[in-house]
Image (cartoon, rainbow, N blue to C red):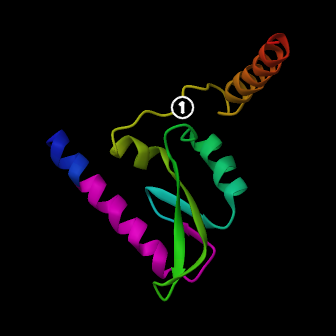
């Protein structure tokens, strides 16, 4: 199958799933490409670490009641298959997907604290 055609099909499926979030009465949504939680950012981040889609595959979408009034946010992440279908790479974190990323984050924060203390 042509790669361009596959990318168009994945993009169409992604757009259709995003629109579906406006009509979902539950607090959780999952299909083959996207997983979403209503007003639960922490759950989305935890699943994105597991799926190795934390860096390239998270997004959020505001939810509107009757299409007019803001009523919470859908926090979503791609599954591995969904992220690959969009043409993006999985996180290169090794292991369970959380160790290296968190170590790097802690190291950056420490470096920022040290550099801000050194500047006078």
Q: Residue at x 19, y 40 (%)?
A: 3
Left or right, 56 with reference to 117: left
Rendering coords of residue 85 (x, y %): 34, 45
Rendering coords of residue 93 (x, y %): 61, 26
In the foreground, 55 or 96:
55
Rendering coords of residue 15 (x, y %): 34, 63
115 part of magenta stretch:
no
Q: Residue furthest front?
A: 120
- Work out whether 21 lies above or below 104: below
Quadrant of the image occupied by residue 112: top right
Left or right, 22 with reference to 95: left
Prevailing secondary structure of the magenta residues: helix
Quadrant of the image occupied by residue 89: top left
Q: Residue at x 57, y 43 (%)?
A: 51
Dot 1 alpha-carbon crowd within 10 angstroms: few under 14, some 14 to 19, many 20 or more? some
The residue wearing badge 1 is 91
Q: Residue at x 14, y 42 (%)?
A: 2
Magenta segment boundaries in residue numbering: 9-29
């Amino acid at each position: 199958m042509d790669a361009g055609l596959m990318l168009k099909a994945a993009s169409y499926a992604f757009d259709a799933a995003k629109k579906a979030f406006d009509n979902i009465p539950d607090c959780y949504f999952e299909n083959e490409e996207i997983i979403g939680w209503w007003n639960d950012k922490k759950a989305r981040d935890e699943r994105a670490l597991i799926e190795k889609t934390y860096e390239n595959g998270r997004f959020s979408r505001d939810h509107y009641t009757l299409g007019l009034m803001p009523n919470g946010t859908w926090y979503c992440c791609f599954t591995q298959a969904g992220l690959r279908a969009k043409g993006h790479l999985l996180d290169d974190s090794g292991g369970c997907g959380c160790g290296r990323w968190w170590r790097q984050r802690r190291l950056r924060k420490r470096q920022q604290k040290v550099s801000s203390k050194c500047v006078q």
